[in-house]
């Protein structure tokens, strides 16, 4: 990427980076560390034209997310809907894909150093 003077790096963090006290310390620390690494790389790699961002979703109804919570797909979506400020929609994998496509696209050519919360406002209600 550096020789081309362009590129995009995306990290997957978590909505826990905007909340406090809800999740295990090890998980929360790791996700906060990823966001701080993203910010540092944004500054370091920006001089080479490389954009660096992260996406922080609320619980996603993936096999791992369902196994971790012990809930099925609908249960994970219901849990998110109860905690989110945004009502009437449910988070799914496509929402994360759309966020990633936006951050990777040239339309976001001046977006770097952003931790994009894809959590329906959960972190705002919970911080």
Image: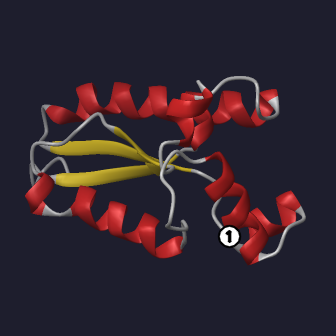
Above-or-below relation of 47 to 51: above
The part of the image, by quadrant, that contains residue 40 is: top left
Q: Nearer the viewer, residue 48 or 28?
A: 28
Residue occupying image coordinates x 62% and y 36%: 16
The number of discs equals 1
Above-or-below relation of 84 to 17: below
How is the protein colored in the picture? secondary structure
Q: Nearer the viewer, residue 87 or 70?
A: 87
Q: Nearer the viewer, residue 83 or 16?
A: 83
Q: Where does the N terminus fall, quadrant-wise?
A: bottom left
Is 44 left or right of 122, judged from the image as shown?
Answer: left
Residue occupying image coordinates x 10% and y 61%: 106
Q: Where does the C terminus fall, quadrant-wise?
A: top right
Percent position of residue 73, x then y: 73, 76
Percent position of residue 93, x then y: 53, 72
Q: Crowding near pointer 1: few (<14 within 10 Å), some, many (20+)? A: many
Is 55 left or right of 110, judged from the image as shown?
Answer: right
Above-or-below relation of 55 to 104: above
Element type where label 1 sits in the image: loop
Residue occupying image coordinates x 33% and y 51%: 9
Percent position of residue 10, x then y: 38, 52
Percent position of residue 19, x then y: 61, 28
The part of the image, by quadrant, that contains residue 67 is: bottom right
Q: Residue furthest toward the front?
A: 88
Is 58 left or right of 27, judged from the image as shown?
Answer: left
Q: Residue furthest toward the right?
A: 70
Is 38 left or right of 13, judged from the image as shown?
Answer: left
The residue that disc 1 covers is 61
Residue occupying image coordinates x 28% and y 32%: 42
């Amino acid at each position: 990427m550096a020789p081309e003077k362009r590129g995009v790096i995306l990290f997957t963090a978590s909505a826990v980076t905007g909340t406090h006290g809800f999740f295990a310390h090890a998980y929360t620390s790791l996700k906060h560390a990823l966001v701080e690494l993203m910010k540092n790389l944004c500054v370091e790699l920006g001089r080479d034209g490389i954009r660096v961002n992260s996406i922080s979703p609320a619980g996603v109804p993936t096999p791992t997310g369902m196994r971790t919570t012990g809930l099925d797909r609908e249960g994970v979506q219901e849990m998110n809907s109860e905690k989110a400020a945004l009502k009437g929609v449910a988070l799914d994998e496509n929402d994360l894909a759309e966020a990633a496509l936006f951050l990777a696209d040239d339309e976001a050519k001046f977006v770097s150093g952003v931790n994009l919360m894809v959590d329906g406002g959960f972190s705002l209600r919970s911080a």
